Amino acid sequence: MSPNSVLKSLLAASLSATLLFAANGAAAQNTPGVLRVSAIPDEAPTELQRKFKPLGDYLAKATGLKVEFTPVTDYAASVEGLVNHKLDMVWFGGFTFVQANVRSKGQVVPLVQRAEDQNFQSVFVTTAPGITKLADLRGKTLSFGSESSTSGHLMPRSFMLGAGLNPDTDLKRIAFSGAHDATVAAVAGGKVDAGALNISVWQKLVESGKVDPKTVRVFYTTPGYVDYNWSVHTRMAPALQKKIRDAFLALDASTPQGREILELQRATKFVPASAEHYRAIETAARSAGLLK
């Protein structure tokens, strides 16, 4: 075989391998028959998996798809995963939804939220007897959750600013624990004087006996605001969006399956969600300098 023929054969083989790799890569990212789901890591990965398992089985039956739950390392990864089509559906907090919606130029939309998310709240907790109101945090140390958390950072920060307290200049130090349960652990362990977190996680920790409310106590509960939702990208087929939305809306606490799923999701029921519901969150984020 001539040198030219050998070169042409090698180039053809290389091109075929490249095309095959690209095709396999595309298939891996968009596997037919699979619904790729994730959630912001506001709790431990094992807890997120435990909470999702019955819901995943339910959605698999409702859609006829294999449902795969993939934990992500941080809040930003959940946003990028949905915006860049590596995920099909994500459980977002209000702020992460706003980030994804803005980042995608309106192509990420919410399907449903829990009824509780229409009037959600955060709590501030402490072990210090001298801290009884937000003003008492001046000169103290405080832990938020993730920087991108709605209930663990954005809204607590917003309410502090509204009370005339700037976390960045009026406190001795602020920290970011990464998750709500980690914030409580930091307060209980004396690493910080106080912490701000999601009221739902706080209630679950108290109910499960993982925290003693006589030792770690709530000293301030915020006014209500709109928070979590399940979001998808608009490129998802409308028929599939409807199947998923209808499945959530059909969950009923009067059935054993519905009761198990709703209890794990800490919901009484799911209701339709709209991007318009999150305009106040976007405004708060821009006002706090957290969204450019």
Image (spheres, rainbow, N blue to C red):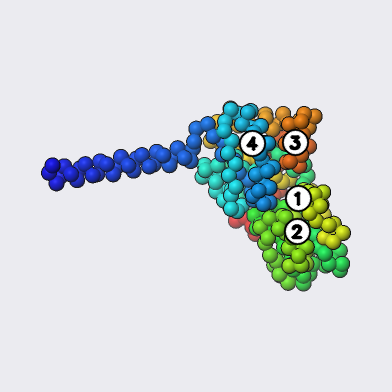
The amino acid type of the residue labelled 4 equals Gly
Q: Name the disc covering residue 56, or none.
A: 4
The amino acid type of the residue labelled 3 equals Glu
Q: Quadrant of the N terminus?
A: top left
**What is the spatial separation of the Cα atoms under label 3 and label 2, in whole angstroms?**
26 Å
Find residue 58 and report its horizontal and vertical position in percent.
66, 32
Whether the residues at callouts 2 and 1 have beta carbons within 8 Å, the answer is yes
Q: Residues within 10 Å of mark 3 (few under 14, many from 20)?
A: some
- Examine the rendering and report whether any part of residue 154 can be seen: no
Q: Secondary structure at mark 2?
A: helix
Question: Where is mark 3, residue-wise?
Answer: 260
- Residue at image position (36%, 39%) is 20
Disc 3 versus disc 2: nearer the observer: 3
- Residue at image position (67%, 30%) is 247
Find residue 145 and report its horizontal and vertical position in percent.
69, 57
Q: Residues within 10 Å of mark 2 (few under 14, many from 20)?
A: many
Q: Secondary structure at mark 3?
A: helix
Q: Secondary structure at mark 4?
A: helix
